[in-house]
Image (cartoon, rainbow, N blue to C red):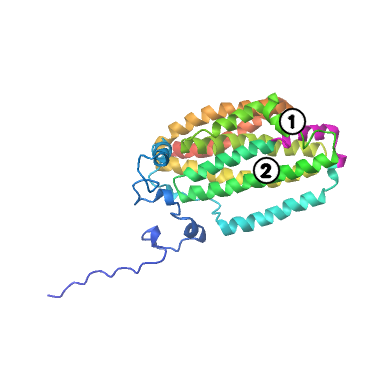
Amino acid sequence: MTEQKAPRQRKMRTFSAFGDVRRMPSEYEIVTHSQNWNTRASKASVFEQNPSSPGNLWFLTYREHSPFQADDWEGFRDPDKIAYRSYVNLQATEQTKLDGVLERYADADASLSEEQVQRLGALHTPSRYLVHGFQQAEAYVGFIGPSSYVTSAAGYANADFLRRVSTVAYRTRSLQLAHPGSGIGENERQRWEQDAAWQPARKAIEQALIAYDWGEAFASLNLVLAPTLDHLLIHQLGEVSRAAGDEQSWLLSGLLDEDSQRRNRWSGALGRYALEQRPSNEKPLRKWFERWGARADDAVGALAPLLGRPADEVVAGARAAREELHAGIFDVAAAAS
């Protein structure tokens, strides 16, 4: 009787962390996969201390016990597959374009109409406070996110918000030099803190900053507030600016919108992935969308008069952009039912 040999085991590869895979992982996957120190399965708790310590209880309460769950968050992938090298190369190119616009229109602000200067001073230059709030909220999403793929995507979105804050600040100074008596460069904080038009937006982002549950933090910012307010502050403001002869603002809005759309793509993909993993995620998502959608609509409605368009038209356009993003997420649940 011949002795049967044991099947030969396949040689382990350096990418064995992905399991028994038959393909070479992409560069994006290799540098992103399972990098979060606070999500390692072998750890009894996030921090190397008493499981009941405040830090461990925070993650236990707001991430592990969040109603927004998946069987395997490591299975999510950013549709754009953005990693550090690709992000740096992409944004180096995009920043070159943005700098080119600023250089090309360096003297154009002096010829803007008084109405357009007032519009920018009331709506655009104070927006850096709101966007900085977006940046802080996105940083929290990345910090508490349940997967390195989520943390990575949120980290680059955070950097996008910082770039936007810098762009708004640069434009603020340019407008101040061109129109020294306009109040631009001097009144932004006062507008942000006291102007009635800005208070619903300020309230909304401050409430988002204390939405500690990781699922609600992600949904409130990435799926509701940012896409809704970006439609007003980037898309609609760009259109109105072009009609007013301010091509610089229109071109800059188009370039910044690329960041916004990229964030929408991975955020929508994450929402769809969560529903594919667990259809039960639809209930908390719809609850958060309703809660934060009302706040986003209030914020856009209050800011709409500063744009110079009918308020109903402005709100409807921003809401439609948000609902289009949501429809792409819930199509997964509809297809499964």
Q: Does the magenta portion include 111?
A: yes
Residue 118: quadrant of the picture: top right
Q: Secondary structure at mark 1?
A: helix
The disc, 1 or 2, on the residue closer to the chain's N-terminal end is: 2
Q: Residue at x 61, y 48 (%)?
A: 159
Q: Residue furthest left?
A: 1
Type of amino acid at the residue the image marks with label 2 = Val
Figure quadrant of the N terminus: bottom left
- The residue range painted magenta reads 110-126
Q: Is residue 268 visible?
A: no
Judge by depth and name the residue closer to the eye, 328 or 42.
42
Tell me: residue 286, above or below residue 2.
above
Tell me: residue 32, above or below residue 131.
below
Q: According to the image, label 2 marks what residue?
A: 165
Q: Does the magenta portion include 93?
A: no
Place of residue 181 in the rendered image (x, y in percent of width and height, measured from the top left): 85, 34
Place of residue 309 in the rendered image (x, y in percent of width and height, measured from the top left): 74, 28
- Image side of residue 252 versus residue 327, left or right: right
